[in-house]
Amino acid sequence: MLYAILCYHDEDVVWSWTKEEDDAVMGRLAVVRERLAPVIGPSARLLPTTAATTLRKSPEPIVIDGPYAETKEQLLGFYVIDVEGLDAALDVARQLAAANPGGAYEIRPIALYQPDKRVP
Amino acid sequence: MTDMGWINGAITGARPAAIGALLRYFRNLDTAEEAFQEAALRALKSWPANGPPRDPAAWLILVGRNAALDGLRVQARHTALPPDEVLSDLDDAETPLAERLDGSHYRDDVLRLLFICCHPDLPATQQIALALRIVSGLSVAQIARAFLVGEAAMEQRITRAKARIARADVPFEAPGAAERAERVGTVASMIYLVFNEGYSAGGDTARSPLCDEAIRLARLLLRLFHTEPEIMGLTALMLLQHARLAARFDAAGEAILLEDQDRTLWNRRMIAEGLALIDKAIRHNQPGPFQLQAAIAATHSRAVGAADTDWAGIDALYAALERMQPSPLVTLNRAVATAKLHGPEAALSMITPLEERLSGYYYYFGARGAFLAQLGRLAEARAAFDRAISLADTPAQAAHIRHHLDGLLRPA
């Protein structure tokens, strides 16, 4: 079963990390990724919401500066994982959380997954 | 990262919103700052045991407000009651806090805080010191080190700024549209001054965190003005310049020219963010000085190697900047692009009229020397380089020119 793990956190906090703190978190996450290599698929870390642009799909689409939703915690990235079921997905999320505390993970089952055709 | 690392990050991240809200309650910078500090101390004790709160800013505001109110009550027993206006906002303390803490309140609070730190009555040096102390939360010692002044002098500068704001009787209402635009411009200039202090210091570790701090402040401002292309330009400009930090100096601390830098050392994440922001800004079709400078930096960032640089594009952008904001420094920078496009002769005649106005300027004589050397006018080049060395602000600048002088001695 494919799940997306959506990473939410206060971007003010995350983008206040010093390089050392950021490197430390990334280093610990790399260890988890290594350990969970068979189940963790593609992942992405997003730039701050200030870099975002939103296209409103009105009949005449409108382009708006900034993120879709103004929230206290922002979508900062995501993982795609392939596991047995929810318990296993939660276990992956717990291991990621131990490496990168703060914020929340939303575990969301994937309905349709189209892998990257550019990569053989 | 340790627990403490995460907690410090959360406190720093929440700081502008929390101090902004506390300032709304107490209408006094010192009280707001002390309330926040008390709340931060309690957070350091409580969060490791209880886990971080869902909304760190709301937690810090509530705890800080209660702590400060306790303080005021204790004081009241010893002295006269504080004047009504100090407490006037507190009558409705029963109002559910959640209602007062929605995102829009945060925005107004943070904006008010930035406007107060950049109050027009304050000289730029005081605006910077106040913003770094109050909004960024740097210690007085850190700010003093960054600006190469004594701690006592910096403490005095900040105290004076606060006193001036208290005297100025700052209105706490949001200013009207016209004044708002003007004051946003002042905040943007303050942020860029902070950045330049860090940028010009190069590898100096006490000063380079100023660049990160300025970028953080710019993102904060951009979140308040999501659609303002000049704020996008400012943020992009600083990201694109700061991205080159690791490549700008050699092991001996000597400056490495842009064209000689190892571009693999450039920070790709900062460049991606800067390019995204300049792309967004350009869509607005309202060019401004920050956007143009960011576009110039972006052109350099997009070149895979120095030889791939689009000098014609850079020359055109500098020409636009010259029209918008005429300055001998802009012309001096444009001359570098002109030299690449049309040769050193054209560049030299472009900068020669600037000599009187830039007679005390290191970069002018450095550039002049380089153009003369390219033309084979070695004696004149040597004179210009000597002049540049005498005007150098840092040993790295002087060493850089000496390197050029050595080049003159070597047979071509």
Image (cartoon, rainbow, N blue to C red):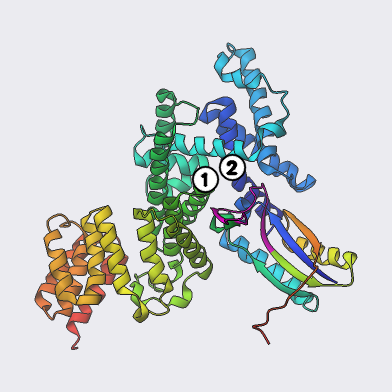
Residue drawn at x 70%, y 32% is B99
Q: Quadrant of residue B253?
A: bottom left
Q: At label 2, which amino acid type do we have?
A: Arg
The answer to whether the residues at label 1 and label 2 have Cβ atoms under 8 Å apart is yes
Toward the top, the furthest residue is: B80
Kindly identify which residue carries mark 2. Answer: B15
Q: Position of residue A57 (x, y in %)?
A: 62, 57
Horizontal side of residue B150 vs B367, given as left or right: right
- Residue A69 belongs to the span the image colors magenta: yes
In-front residue for pair B378/B296: B296
In-front residue for pair B320/B382: B320
Tell me which segment is drawn in magenta. Answer: A56-77
Kindly identify which residue carries mark 1. Answer: B136
Horizontal side of residue A113 vs B30, given as left or right: right
Horizontal side of residue A55 vs B159, given as left or right: right
Q: CA distance from mark 1 to mark 2?
A: 7 Å
Q: Position of residue B215 (x, y in %)?
A: 48, 54
Q: Chain of mark 1?
A: B
